[in-house]
Image (cartoon, rainbow, N blue to C red):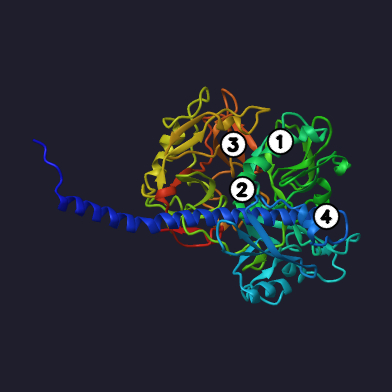
Amino acid sequence: MKKGFTLVELIAVIIVLAIVALLATPVVIDVINDSRESANLRSIEGYARAIKQEYYNQSMDGGTPTIDETFLSNVETGGGSIVCEDILYNPDNGVIMYKCKFDNNDKEYCYANDNHYACDDEIFLGIYTGQGGGTSDSKSLIDTLLEQYQEGNEVGLVKDETNPNLYYYTGTNEQVANNFLWYGGHQWRVLEFDKEKKTLTLITQQPLTAIQPASAVWTTKEEYESSYIKTWLNDYFWNSLNSSIQNNILASTFNIGIYTDVDEITTTQRVGLLDEDQYKRAGEGDSFLDIKDYFWLGNRYNSSRVRNVASSGSLGSSLVSNSYGVRAVIKISDITIAGGDGTLASNYQVGNKATNTNNVQVGEYINVPYSGSDNVCGNDNICTFRVVSKDSNSIKVVLNGLLSTTSAWATDASDNITTSDLIYTNVLNKFIENIDSKYITTGTYGVGMYESGNSYTVPQSTTITANIGLPTIGEMFSGNDIDLSSSSAKTFVDVGTIENPTASYYYWTMNRYSSSSVRCVNYGGYLDCYSPSDTDGVRAVIYLKSGTSAITFTGGEGTPNSPYVLS
């Protein structure tokens, strides 16, 4: 015979459920409110970006736009729930300020350009007038750079002869030593800035990858729009950036015409390439833009060749079947810096730091403890890695340098690499044994073949799953972003931050070139190919845990000279 619950038992169950509900309700409400807050902030960031873009678009026509109803009617609010008022514009300092509300709560959100501030009237108006609101050591990057200018400068920071508001850099690294910026996980050099429009043009100091630029040379805008390199910059690279960085990048004009007439063809996009005139204006070979690596420019040489800069710093041209470095160029609105003196050892910084692997930015550096006694990562037994990509459960990182032991890739290259091949059994498997499993997880590695004429996506289309691997062509930092030993001094980062920089002139990738050769990265910053039995450098790639297993950082700033420290 089945026995039912007694009245006392039912009351006890009800009391327990009531207590659970009482405890859970605030948590649920907090989650809902946090989600709403996050959505609101994203909407306002989109609005901020639209305001800046409209301001820049109207500035292109000459003069200074007036922030009025006509101006704002051209700005997309991103939805009907947002209402922004008290919009102020100060033409003396370029600050656009506004307060916004949403119909899903009564909270006010106050922004000055792209920075979020407390809605305190004194702070709000202080920022607008330039008399307060920020921290005492915060300063506009443009205002900081202007302090370098002296009337009559012919090298260093120079004023443009045709536009009194435009300043640009020209000269050697000794003459241009303080225009380094650490921003969004990357080291940039400032090319130029406009003090009236409050915009700066930047180029990455290091090659971000090495790829073939297109299937054929572009002779029209449409052909360039479908090129591999344009897609990599505005899809792969763009999507790797945090939204706060994306929101501060302006769509701008890039010159992609023939090298003798660079603006013969132009395109408007968020990320582009350096053109030949910009390189020449900076001083060409031995200038601050000469990194002693091969990298592509945005111009064609003729119908079969694309313009590039060689490792000597001289201008050259090459077939599109070659794979040289890619350096991104962007235009941003002025930013507030929180530290640094603009030198290679102390880049200007905005002060944003991650607290764990969930909010780290692609490009930032992390120190990982190594337990081996073979001195692979120096006497400190700390290996420095750089973030390649992120997903919901892990971050992919590449060693900022090489392992101390070189290795053959495999006995032959008739098939894709496996975890049974020589480079795994000789080096990689031994290295990963000395990384604590509490830090790492398995991940996918692209092992597809990269033949002449291929898109960068092809090597990533075939994968293996492993707990360690090598760089995959087309991914971030699969070009020579580290400073391998060479006859010419490079200026990427302090060589002291690179693991085993003299171990080899080359390092292997995961990808074959043919049935008899494998792709590797040359010290000159381009992709080469060698027999799999050759002995080359090994640059390890691993996955660190994130998501629900996120690893906390106990120190560091994420820069090459101050990597994050794992707990």
Assess whether mark 2 and mark 1 are in contact (beta carbons under 8 angstroms).
no
Picture disc at residue 481: 2
Residue at left offset 68%, top offset 57%: 48
Badge nearest the viewer, 1 or 4: 4
Residue at left offset 75%, top offset 62%: 176
Of callouts 1 and 4, which one flags the residue occurring earlier in the amino acid sequence? 4
Query: Label 4 vs label 2: CA separation?
Result: 38 Å
Residue at left offset 36%, top offset 47%: 437
Badge nearest the viewer, 3 or 4: 4
Instruction: Say which amino acid is labelled 3.
Output: Ile
Badge nearest the viewer, 1 or 2: 1
Q: Quadrant of residue 98?
A: bottom right
Q: x and y percent of residue 560 in the render?
A: 56, 57
Q: Is residue 185 visible?
A: no
Q: Secondary structure at mark 3?
A: loop
Assess whether mark 4 and mark 3 are in contact (beta carbons under 8 angstroms).
no
Q: In the image, is 304 to the left or to the right of 508? A: right
Instruction: Say which amino acid is labelled 4.
Output: Gln
**Where does label 1 land, which residue?**
213
Q: Residues within 10 Å of mark 4 (few under 14, many from 20)?
A: some
Q: x and y percent of residue 14 in the render?
A: 24, 53
